[in-house]
Amino acid sequence: MLKIGLQLYTVREELEKDFEGTIRKVAELGYASVEFFHFFGRSSAEVAALLEETGLVALGAHRPYTEMLEHTAEEIRYNLEIGNKNLIIPYLTEEQRNWEQVVSDLRAIGAKTAEQGAVLFYHNHDFEFTQKVGEQTAFDYIFAGVPAEQLQVELDTCWVHFAGYDPVAYIEKYAGRLPIIHLKDVKRSEDGSPETVVLGEGEVNLAAILEAADKAGAEWAVVEQDFCARPAMDSIADSMKWIKAYANQGGNVHV
Protein backbone atom coordinates (compact mmCIF):
# COMPACT_ATOMS: atom_id res chain seq x y z
CA MET A 1 0.00 0.00 0.00
CA LEU A 2 1.37 3.38 -1.03
CA LYS A 3 2.36 5.99 1.52
CA ILE A 4 1.72 9.65 0.77
CA GLY A 5 4.31 12.40 0.84
CA LEU A 6 4.56 16.02 -0.24
CA GLN A 7 7.23 17.64 -2.40
CA LEU A 8 7.91 20.79 -0.43
CA TYR A 9 8.59 22.82 -3.58
CA THR A 10 4.80 23.18 -3.68
CA VAL A 11 4.92 25.37 -0.55
CA ARG A 12 8.26 27.07 -1.23
CA GLU A 13 7.05 30.61 -0.53
CA GLU A 14 5.55 29.56 2.80
CA LEU A 15 8.77 27.75 3.76
CA GLU A 16 10.82 30.85 3.04
CA LYS A 17 8.63 32.87 5.40
CA ASP A 18 8.27 30.23 8.15
CA PHE A 19 10.15 27.00 7.60
CA GLU A 20 9.29 25.28 10.87
CA GLY A 21 5.67 26.43 10.95
CA THR A 22 5.03 25.29 7.40
CA ILE A 23 6.48 21.83 8.06
CA ARG A 24 4.24 21.51 11.12
CA LYS A 25 1.16 22.45 9.05
CA VAL A 26 2.05 19.86 6.41
CA ALA A 27 2.09 17.20 9.12
CA GLU A 28 -1.23 18.42 10.51
CA LEU A 29 -2.83 18.00 7.07
CA GLY A 30 -2.09 14.27 7.16
CA TYR A 31 1.00 13.92 5.01
CA ALA A 32 3.23 11.12 6.30
CA SER A 33 6.43 12.32 4.73
CA VAL A 34 8.14 15.18 2.98
CA GLU A 35 10.50 15.44 0.05
CA PHE A 36 12.87 18.36 0.48
CA PHE A 37 14.31 20.59 -2.23
CA HIS A 38 16.04 23.23 -0.06
CA PHE A 39 16.91 23.45 3.62
CA PHE A 40 16.80 27.24 4.00
CA GLY A 41 20.01 27.44 6.00
CA ARG A 42 18.98 24.95 8.68
CA SER A 43 21.55 22.52 10.02
CA SER A 44 20.98 18.81 9.67
CA ALA A 45 20.45 18.64 13.45
CA GLU A 46 17.71 21.29 13.27
CA VAL A 47 15.93 19.52 10.43
CA ALA A 48 16.22 16.12 12.13
CA ALA A 49 14.74 17.56 15.34
CA LEU A 50 11.82 19.08 13.43
CA LEU A 51 11.10 15.78 11.72
CA GLU A 52 11.18 13.97 15.04
CA GLU A 53 8.83 16.55 16.56
CA THR A 54 6.28 16.29 13.75
CA GLY A 55 6.60 12.56 13.09
CA LEU A 56 7.29 13.22 9.42
CA VAL A 57 9.62 10.98 7.44
CA ALA A 58 12.18 12.48 5.07
CA LEU A 59 11.47 10.29 2.04
CA GLY A 60 13.86 12.08 -0.28
CA ALA A 61 15.50 15.33 -1.31
CA HIS A 62 15.77 17.01 -4.67
CA ARG A 63 19.35 18.24 -4.95
CA PRO A 64 20.80 20.23 -7.85
CA TYR A 65 22.81 18.36 -10.47
CA THR A 66 25.88 20.55 -10.01
CA GLU A 67 25.79 20.15 -6.22
CA MET A 68 25.62 16.39 -6.54
CA LEU A 69 28.52 16.47 -8.99
CA GLU A 70 30.77 18.85 -7.09
CA HIS A 71 29.80 18.23 -3.46
CA THR A 72 28.69 14.60 -3.47
CA ALA A 73 30.08 13.65 -0.06
CA GLU A 74 28.63 16.71 1.68
CA GLU A 75 25.19 16.16 0.14
CA ILE A 76 25.17 12.51 1.20
CA ARG A 77 26.37 13.29 4.71
CA TYR A 78 23.76 16.01 5.36
CA ASN A 79 20.89 13.88 4.09
CA LEU A 80 21.88 10.79 6.03
CA GLU A 81 22.06 12.96 9.16
CA ILE A 82 18.40 13.95 8.73
CA GLY A 83 17.40 10.34 8.12
CA ASN A 84 17.08 10.57 4.35
CA LYS A 85 18.88 8.13 2.06
CA ASN A 86 17.21 9.09 -1.24
CA LEU A 87 19.00 11.84 -3.20
CA ILE A 88 17.20 12.91 -6.34
CA ILE A 89 18.45 14.86 -9.36
CA PRO A 90 15.38 16.99 -10.08
CA TYR A 91 16.11 18.86 -13.30
CA LEU A 92 18.64 19.53 -16.02
CA THR A 93 19.06 22.93 -17.64
CA GLU A 94 19.19 23.06 -21.43
CA GLU A 95 22.97 23.48 -21.24
CA GLN A 96 23.25 20.31 -19.13
CA ARG A 97 21.34 18.06 -21.54
CA ASN A 98 24.33 16.39 -23.14
CA TRP A 99 22.88 12.94 -22.65
CA GLU A 100 26.10 10.95 -23.00
CA GLN A 101 27.73 13.17 -20.37
CA VAL A 102 24.65 12.93 -18.15
CA VAL A 103 24.86 9.13 -18.18
CA SER A 104 28.55 9.24 -17.35
CA ASP A 105 27.98 11.70 -14.50
CA LEU A 106 25.06 9.75 -13.07
CA ARG A 107 27.09 6.54 -13.06
CA ALA A 108 29.84 8.30 -11.11
CA ILE A 109 27.50 9.98 -8.63
CA GLY A 110 25.44 6.81 -8.24
CA ALA A 111 28.51 4.73 -7.43
CA LYS A 112 29.62 7.18 -4.72
CA THR A 113 26.10 7.40 -3.33
CA ALA A 114 25.72 3.62 -3.12
CA GLU A 115 29.08 3.28 -1.38
CA GLN A 116 27.78 5.50 1.42
CA GLY A 117 24.52 3.60 1.87
CA ALA A 118 22.37 6.13 0.04
CA VAL A 119 20.40 5.90 -3.22
CA LEU A 120 20.54 8.15 -6.27
CA PHE A 121 17.37 8.89 -8.26
CA TYR A 122 16.55 10.86 -11.38
CA HIS A 123 13.27 12.83 -11.59
CA ASN A 124 11.86 13.64 -15.02
CA HIS A 125 10.02 16.48 -16.64
CA ASP A 126 8.54 16.32 -20.13
CA PHE A 127 11.72 17.10 -22.09
CA GLU A 128 13.23 13.68 -21.35
CA PHE A 129 10.36 12.26 -23.43
CA THR A 130 10.27 14.84 -26.20
CA GLN A 131 14.04 14.66 -26.76
CA LYS A 132 15.48 11.54 -28.36
CA VAL A 133 18.86 9.83 -28.42
CA GLY A 134 18.73 7.74 -31.56
CA GLU A 135 15.45 5.85 -31.39
CA GLN A 136 15.15 6.10 -27.60
CA THR A 137 13.63 8.82 -25.49
CA ALA A 138 16.27 10.56 -23.40
CA PHE A 139 14.52 9.09 -20.35
CA ASP A 140 14.98 5.51 -21.54
CA TYR A 141 18.52 6.29 -22.67
CA ILE A 142 19.46 7.44 -19.15
CA PHE A 143 18.10 4.37 -17.41
CA ALA A 144 19.52 2.00 -20.00
CA GLY A 145 22.93 3.57 -19.54
CA VAL A 146 23.09 3.59 -15.75
CA PRO A 147 22.58 0.32 -13.84
CA ALA A 148 19.77 0.05 -11.33
CA GLU A 149 22.18 -0.26 -8.40
CA GLN A 150 23.49 3.21 -9.28
CA LEU A 151 20.25 4.93 -10.28
CA GLN A 152 16.59 4.53 -9.39
CA VAL A 153 13.50 6.06 -10.99
CA GLU A 154 11.38 8.81 -9.52
CA LEU A 155 8.68 8.99 -12.18
CA ASP A 156 6.80 12.25 -12.43
CA THR A 157 3.69 10.70 -13.91
CA CYS A 158 2.09 14.02 -14.83
CA TRP A 159 4.99 15.05 -17.07
CA VAL A 160 4.96 11.63 -18.74
CA HIS A 161 1.28 12.20 -19.52
CA PHE A 162 1.83 15.77 -20.68
CA ALA A 163 4.59 14.63 -23.05
CA GLY A 164 2.09 12.31 -24.75
CA TYR A 165 3.13 9.00 -23.20
CA ASP A 166 1.20 6.59 -20.99
CA PRO A 167 2.33 6.89 -17.36
CA VAL A 168 0.83 3.51 -16.47
CA ALA A 169 2.88 1.85 -19.21
CA TYR A 170 6.03 3.54 -17.90
CA ILE A 171 5.26 2.49 -14.34
CA GLU A 172 4.93 -1.09 -15.55
CA LYS A 173 8.11 -0.82 -17.63
CA TYR A 174 10.18 0.26 -14.62
CA ALA A 175 8.53 -1.93 -11.99
CA GLY A 176 11.08 -2.95 -9.39
CA ARG A 177 13.17 0.16 -10.04
CA LEU A 178 10.51 2.68 -9.06
CA PRO A 179 10.26 3.29 -5.29
CA ILE A 180 8.81 6.79 -5.70
CA ILE A 181 6.30 8.40 -8.05
CA HIS A 182 5.17 11.99 -8.25
CA LEU A 183 1.41 12.37 -8.21
CA LYS A 184 0.36 15.53 -9.96
CA ASP A 185 -2.60 16.75 -11.99
CA VAL A 186 -2.65 19.15 -14.93
CA LYS A 187 -4.94 20.86 -17.36
CA ARG A 188 -3.98 22.63 -20.56
CA SER A 189 -4.39 26.34 -21.07
CA GLU A 190 -5.84 27.70 -24.31
CA ASP A 191 -2.33 28.01 -25.71
CA GLY A 192 -1.54 24.39 -24.79
CA SER A 193 0.76 25.22 -21.90
CA PRO A 194 0.47 23.17 -18.69
CA GLU A 195 -1.38 24.43 -15.62
CA THR A 196 -0.79 22.25 -12.57
CA VAL A 197 -3.91 21.89 -10.44
CA VAL A 198 -5.21 20.26 -7.28
CA LEU A 199 -5.55 16.49 -7.54
CA GLY A 200 -8.79 15.53 -9.27
CA GLU A 201 -9.22 18.87 -11.04
CA GLY A 202 -7.23 18.01 -14.16
CA GLU A 203 -6.98 15.45 -16.94
CA VAL A 204 -4.61 12.85 -15.43
CA ASN A 205 -6.02 9.41 -14.55
CA LEU A 206 -4.72 9.46 -10.97
CA ALA A 207 -6.51 6.30 -9.82
CA ALA A 208 -4.97 4.24 -12.63
CA ILE A 209 -1.53 5.60 -11.78
CA LEU A 210 -1.86 4.79 -8.08
CA GLU A 211 -3.09 1.28 -8.81
CA ALA A 212 -0.24 0.65 -11.23
CA ALA A 213 2.36 2.09 -8.85
CA ASP A 214 1.22 -0.13 -6.02
CA LYS A 215 1.39 -3.21 -8.27
CA ALA A 216 4.86 -2.15 -9.42
CA GLY A 217 6.16 -2.13 -5.85
CA ALA A 218 6.42 1.62 -5.34
CA GLU A 219 6.55 2.77 -1.72
CA TRP A 220 5.75 6.48 -1.96
CA ALA A 221 3.35 8.62 -3.96
CA VAL A 222 4.49 12.22 -3.63
CA VAL A 223 2.02 15.05 -4.17
CA GLU A 224 3.43 18.01 -6.06
CA GLN A 225 1.87 21.08 -7.60
CA ASP A 226 4.45 23.19 -9.41
CA PHE A 227 2.31 26.32 -9.41
CA CYS A 228 -0.86 26.97 -7.42
CA ALA A 229 -3.63 29.30 -8.60
CA ARG A 230 -4.93 29.60 -5.03
CA PRO A 231 -2.90 29.60 -1.79
CA ALA A 232 -0.51 26.68 -1.72
CA MET A 233 -1.53 25.47 1.74
CA ASP A 234 -5.15 25.37 0.61
CA SER A 235 -4.13 23.48 -2.52
CA ILE A 236 -2.25 20.75 -0.66
CA ALA A 237 -5.14 20.47 1.80
CA ASP A 238 -7.56 19.95 -1.10
CA SER A 239 -5.24 17.39 -2.69
CA MET A 240 -5.17 15.50 0.59
CA LYS A 241 -8.98 15.54 0.60
CA TRP A 242 -8.92 13.85 -2.81
CA ILE A 243 -6.47 11.23 -1.54
CA LYS A 244 -8.59 10.50 1.54
CA ALA A 245 -11.71 10.18 -0.61
CA TYR A 246 -9.83 7.78 -2.89
CA ALA A 247 -8.69 5.76 0.13
CA ASN A 248 -12.23 5.65 1.53
CA GLN A 249 -13.41 4.14 -1.78
CA GLY A 250 -10.92 1.29 -1.41
CA GLY A 251 -7.91 2.96 -2.98
CA ASN A 252 -4.52 1.47 -2.24
CA VAL A 253 -3.05 4.35 -0.22
CA HIS A 254 -2.30 4.67 3.46
CA VAL A 255 -3.56 7.89 5.06
Image (cartoon, helix red, strand yellow):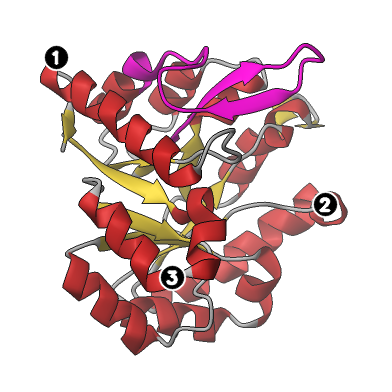
Q: Nearer the viewer, residue 154 or 196?
A: 196
Residue name at image x 50 percent, y 59 percent:
14
Q: In the rendered image of this protein, does residue 170 appear above or below residue 123?
A: above
- Please state which amino acid type lies under the numbered disc 2: Asn
How far apart marks 3 and 1 lie (CA) works out to 34 Å
Q: Is residue 176 left or right of residue 103?
A: left
- Callout 1: few (<14), some (14-19), or many (20+) C-alpha neighbours within 10 Å? few
From where the camera sits, is residue 29 visible?
Answer: yes
Residue type highlighted by circle 3: Phe
Q: Which of the two labelled residues, at mark 2 and mark 1, occupies the earlier sequence position? A: 2
Circle 2: element type: loop
Relative to 188, residue 124 above or below = below
Q: Nearer the viewer, mark 2 or mark 1?
A: 1
Q: Position of residue 196 (x, y in %)?
A: 58, 29
Please give the label number shown on residue 19.
3
* Residue holding disc 1: 249
Residue at point 18% right, 73% down? 53
Point out the image quarter for the N terminus.
top left
Where in the figure is residue 75, as x and y percent of width and height? Answer: 51, 79
Identify the amino acid type marked 1. Gln
Q: Is residue 98 positioned above or below 71 on the image?
A: above
**Between 54 and 184, which is closer to the camera in this rendering?**
54
* x then y, percent, for residue 69: 66, 74
Label 3 secondary element: helix
Q: Quadrant of residue 102?
A: bottom right
Sequence-wise first label, 2 or 3: 3
Magenta range:
181-209
Identify the residue position indicated by label 2 in the image.
98
Decide which of tag 3 and tag 1 comes sooner along the chain: 3
